[in-house]
Image (spheres, rainbow, N blue to C red):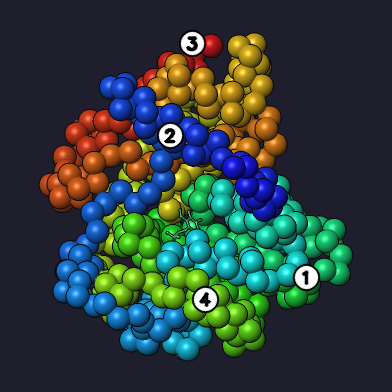
């Protein structure tokens, strides 16, 4: 049989990210020592409070409301109010199997073009393309830590003319590790209001922020046009639990009601035991603060170690301020790389994997041109359980910390440095 498929789906290619991830895993399986800087997921074990909630509710076999359990939505509402000073009542909150699915449904439902800063998370574009939506990347600059500026946004909105526009802004940011200040977001909000842009404020990394400032959100200066997304995956280290939340302003209730309808006709609801884990996470957040604080410190240490090594070896890289990523570029090595046949970011990533045994992801997967020599690096290639358990008693000397707790980060940097300086 040769079934004909929806052309919108078949035009989505397997991403280089996935390909490099698979290759790195395969090389590891064959016994090669690979530093996996391509792999970005929370490094730590799921906190016991969440695990216990799943166990306690393993016999919950009833379908739950499509929008999510009312007590869970109440807990989410209270959490956002207390932690981020954002006021979304429980009836304006929707629970889904990961914020990724909720973002997809929003892109599916809302007409108009999608604006994404370049670089941005890999999945926004393909999600929009699955629905035949125009995607307009807005190139940002390294000098501004790859943060979108009002001028850049204004020019892009202007280009799109009268049609409805959506913007996804991720803060703290994957792939750059940048954190917007509230002032920077306020300035962007003015442009969004002028063009009536619908904003998805992707705040899945909220709380993993090394700057010590409160989470900045577009929902503060531009509440009527901003949808906030978040979930358990990052701060609570529970990506595989698949629980995301989306918070809608009253003015955009139409989108939320349509999402509820889609949920009711597709997956019905998020798995019941997992909703109880979500309830535990959000309603007992005070008890989870020591976990959150310690993991944030560890992410900051690991990211800053990598960043300092990258700067030392001659790469350009804005300082990571949150999440567990950064975006170094290899521009200073451009001519040497070309001399060795590496004209694209993908060619560079492939050679770095083959020769330095370090997995990095090419800038082209993050909405840059193929020739862009930026790369996404994740700083989570360490034994999260061991590091978490021993962090309190770590050596005073940071070199000893790296040697004991982050040997893969150290070895990957050593090999990358040798690769670059051997060119
Ligand atoms: C920027 C960004 N947004 C959204 C998600 C989706 O998270 P989840 O579907 O696990 O809630 C991720 C996950 O990697 C991400 O990096």
Nearer mark to the viewer, of 1 and 4: 4
Q: Which mark is residue 164?
A: 1
Earlier along the polypeptide chain: callout 3 or callout 4? Answer: 4
Label 4–label 2 contact, CB within 8 A: no
- Above or below residue 342? Residue 69 is below
Q: Which residue is mark 3?
A: 422
Count residues near mark 3 (Cα–Cα under 10 Å), then give few for <14, some for 14-19, many for 20+: few
- Above or below residue 283? Residue 10 is above
C-alpha gap between disc 2 and disc 1:
38 Å
C-alpha gap between disc 3 and disc 2:
27 Å
Earlier along the polypeptide chain: callout 1 or callout 4? Answer: 1
C-alpha gap between disc 1 and disc 4:
27 Å
Residue 335 as seen in the image, left or right of residue 180: right
Q: Which residue is mark 2?
A: 22
Q: Position of residue 405 (x, y in %)?
A: 22, 37
Count residues near mark 2 (Cα–Cα under 10 Å), then give few for <14, some for 14-19, many for 20+: few
**Residue pictured at 37% horizontal, 28% vertical:** 26
**Residue pictured at 70% horizontal, 36% vertical:** 369
């Amino acid at each position: 049989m040769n079934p004909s498929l929806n052309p919108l789906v078949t035009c989505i290619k397997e991403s280089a990210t996935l390909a490099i991830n698979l290759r790195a895993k395969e090389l590891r399986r064959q016994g090669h020592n690979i530093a996996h800087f391509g792999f970005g997921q929370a490094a730590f074990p799921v906190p016991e409070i969440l695990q216990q909630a799943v166990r306690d509710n393993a016999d919950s076999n009833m379908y739950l409301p499509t929008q999510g359990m009312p007590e869970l939505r109440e807990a989410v509402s209270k959490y956002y109010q207390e932690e981020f000073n954002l006021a979304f009542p429980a009836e304006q909150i929707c629970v889904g199997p990961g914020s990724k699915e909720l973002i997809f449904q929003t892109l599916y439902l809302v007409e108009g073009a999608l604006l994404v800063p370049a670089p941005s998370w890999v999945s926004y574009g393909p999600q929009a393309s699955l629905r035949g939506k125009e995607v307009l990347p807005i190139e940002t600059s390294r000098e501004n830590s790859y943060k979108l500026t009002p001028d850049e946004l204004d020019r892009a909105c202007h280009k799109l003319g009268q049609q409805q526009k959506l913007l996804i802004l991720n803060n703290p940011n994957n792939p750059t590790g940048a954190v917007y200040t509230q002032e920077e977001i306020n300035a962007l909000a003015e442009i969004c209001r002028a063009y009536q842009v619908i904003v998805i404020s992707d705040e899945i990394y909220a709380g993993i922020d090394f700057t010590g400032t409160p989470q900045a959100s577009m929902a503060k200066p531009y509440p009527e046009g901003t949808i906030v997304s978040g979930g358990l995956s990052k701060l609570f280290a529970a990506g595989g639990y698949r629980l995301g939340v989306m918070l809608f302003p009253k003015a955009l209730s139409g989108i939320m009601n349509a999402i509820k309808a889609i949920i009711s006709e597709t997956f019905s609801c998020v798995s019941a035991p997992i909703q109880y884990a979500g309830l535990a996470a959000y309603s007992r957040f005070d008890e989870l603060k020591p976990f959150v604080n310690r993991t944030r410190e560890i992410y900051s240490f690991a990211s800053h170690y990598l960043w300092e090594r990258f700067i030392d070896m001659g790469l350009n890289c804005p300082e990571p301020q949150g999440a567990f990523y950064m975006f170094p570029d290899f521009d200073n090595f451009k001519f040497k790389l070309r001399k060795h046949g590496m004209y694209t970011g993908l060619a560079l990533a492939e050679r770095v994997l083959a020769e330095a045994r370090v997995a990095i992801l090419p800038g082209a997967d993050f909405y840059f041109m193929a020739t862009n020599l930026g790369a996404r690096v994740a700083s989570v290639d360490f034994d999260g359980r061991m590091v978490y358990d021993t962090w309190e008693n770590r050596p005073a000397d940071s070199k000893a910390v790296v040697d004991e707790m982050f040997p893969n980060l150290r070895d990957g940097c050593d090999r990358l440095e040798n690769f670059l300086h051997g060119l």
